[in-house]
Structures are given as structure tokens and as C-alpha cells.
């Protein structure tokens, strides 16, 4: 019985990742408050994104958490060095109603 629940949870997480947006590009804009919002230069228009609530075509992280501070550091470093990043969205707009949260970010070589 427990294995059925585990398989169900794994499937839900996989489905959520499928609906999330994945974008590769250079950081073009950064906004900072207690949250960090950013947009990539290759960001599709909001109407072409998978996550319907992301009407501003930007990503957001909570700058008061360790994960959010790490994401903020990564996007600052990528912006300063001109490197591209790969951003995989979280598939939801839980942190801010018009911007997609982040599952992970990677700075590309």
C-alpha cells in the first residue's frame, strides 16, 4: 500500500516538472526586494509559457531563504560575467502571483 502512495507522489512531482517552464539565456533584468525576480533575454512571451499564472514572463525566488540567496548569487554572477543560465521553473506561482518559482538554476560554461 505504501508503494502505491510513493509511486503516486513521484508521478505528481514528475507531472509538475513537465508543466514547468525551462529557459536558457542571459540574465537581462533583476528586481530585488525580499524576493528576487529576474528575466532572461530569451524569455518567451507570457502567452507562450507553460505556467499560465506567469503573466510577467519572469522567475522569482525568496531572498530570505538559503535557496533564494543562492539563486540570487548565481544570477548576479551570471549577469556580471555574461554567462548563460539554465532555469527550470517550479511549475507554480506560489511565491508571487504573477511570476514562476524556481526548481533549480544552473550556470552554463
Image (cartoon, rainbow, N blue to C red):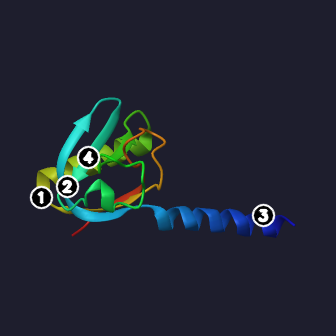
Give the residue displayed 13% in from the left and 50% down from the top: 80
Q: Distance of mark 4 from mark 3, alpha carbons?
A: 36 Å
Q: Are marks 1 and 2 in contact (CB under 8 Å)?
A: yes
Give the residue displayed 48% in from the left and 50% down from the top: 92
Residue that numbered label 2 is attached to: 78
Pointer 2 local density, CA inside 10 Å: few below 14, some 14–19, many at least 20: some
Instruction: Answer with left or right where residue 96 lies relative to residue 12.
Output: left
Residue 108 drawn above or below residue 91 = below
Residue that numbered label 3 is attached to: 5
Residue 2 rendering spot, x and y as whole percentages: 83, 64
Residue 17 drawn above or below residue 59 = below
Image quarter of the N terminus: bottom right
Q: Secondary structure at mark 4?
A: strand
Residue that numbered label 1 is attached to: 82
Residue 7 drawn above or below residue 34 = below
Instruction: Answer with left or right where residue 3 lies relative to residue 61.
Output: right
Residue that numbered label 4 is attached to: 38
Foreground label between 3 and 1: 3
Amino acid at each position: 500500500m505504501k508503494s502505491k502512495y510513493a509511486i503516486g507522489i513521484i508521478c505528481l512531482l514528475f507531472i509538475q516538472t513537465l508543466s514547468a517552464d525551462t529557459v536558457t539565456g542571459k540574465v537581462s533584468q533583476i528586481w530585488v526586494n525580499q524576493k528576487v525576480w529576474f528575466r532572461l533575454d530569451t524569455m518567451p512571451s507570457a502567452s507562450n509559457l507553460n505556467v499560465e499564472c506567469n503573466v510577467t514572463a519572469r522567475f522569482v525566488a525568496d531572498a530570505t531563504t538559503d535557496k533564494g540567496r543562492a539563486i540570487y548569487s548565481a544570477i548576479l554572477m551570471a549577469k556580471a560575467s555574461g554567462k548563460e543560465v539554465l532555469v527550470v521553473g517550479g511549475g507554480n506561482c506560489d511565491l508571487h502571483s504573477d511570476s514562476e518559482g524556481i526548481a533549480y538554476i544552473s550556470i552554463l560554461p
